Image (spheres, grey):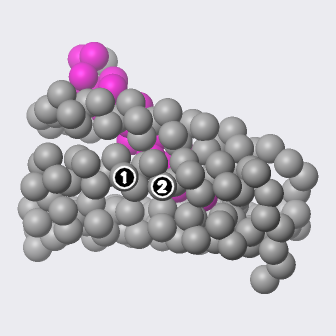
Amino acid sequence: MERSTDSNSRWIAACCGVIIAALYVVAFVSKTELRHLVQTVPLWLGVVLALLGVRVAKWVVLPILLFWLAAMTFIWLFLLGWSRVISGHFSPVEIAMTVVIGTSALIGLLFSMKGKRQVTPLGASCVFLLSAAFQFAAFRISMLPGIARR
């Protein structure tokens, strides 16, 4: 694996770290620690790869950040009464964390798009799809009855 540590990579790692922290706050408030621990596993991979300066890091985090931005958008749309893709009861702390997560995801996406392409289009596409599958699998596993309420 080729490495290239730069300020973009550090920003990407920081944004993923902020999302992890915000999800742990939600976990603590909602008493769903295991569920949110499982949901953060792909983000941890992004943090590690970005901090190590692995060139594919931005392609790993791109679908993960898109996932979290989309999830937060759907929560905001629900709270505004415009959509029911995601529904539920959200405490004030959880609502505040949606803002933190959404903002961090957006900033991380912007830094992921900056800089020169260091991976072939085919390689980037493969990494992107694998990472997206990993994020969706982690989220799906976190919703299993044995995990979702823990």
Image: magenta residue range? 61-81
Mark 2 element type: helix
Label 2 belongs to which residue? 17
- Residue type at mark 2 is Gly
What is the quadrant of residue 91 in the picture? Answer: top left
Q: Element under label 1?
A: helix
Label 1, label 2: how many angstroms apart (C-alpha)? 6 Å
Front residue of this view, candidates 111 and 74? 111
Callout 1, which amino acid?
Ala
Q: Is residue 4 above or below residue 85?
A: below
- Are dots 1 and 2 in contact, CB under 8 Å? yes
Q: Position of residue 90 (x, y in %)?
A: 16, 33
125, 111: nearer the viewer: 111
Is 74 positioned to the left or the right of 106 in the image?
A: left
Disc 1 target residue: 21
Q: Position of residue 123 (x, y in %)?
A: 79, 71
How many discs mark residues in the rendered view? 2
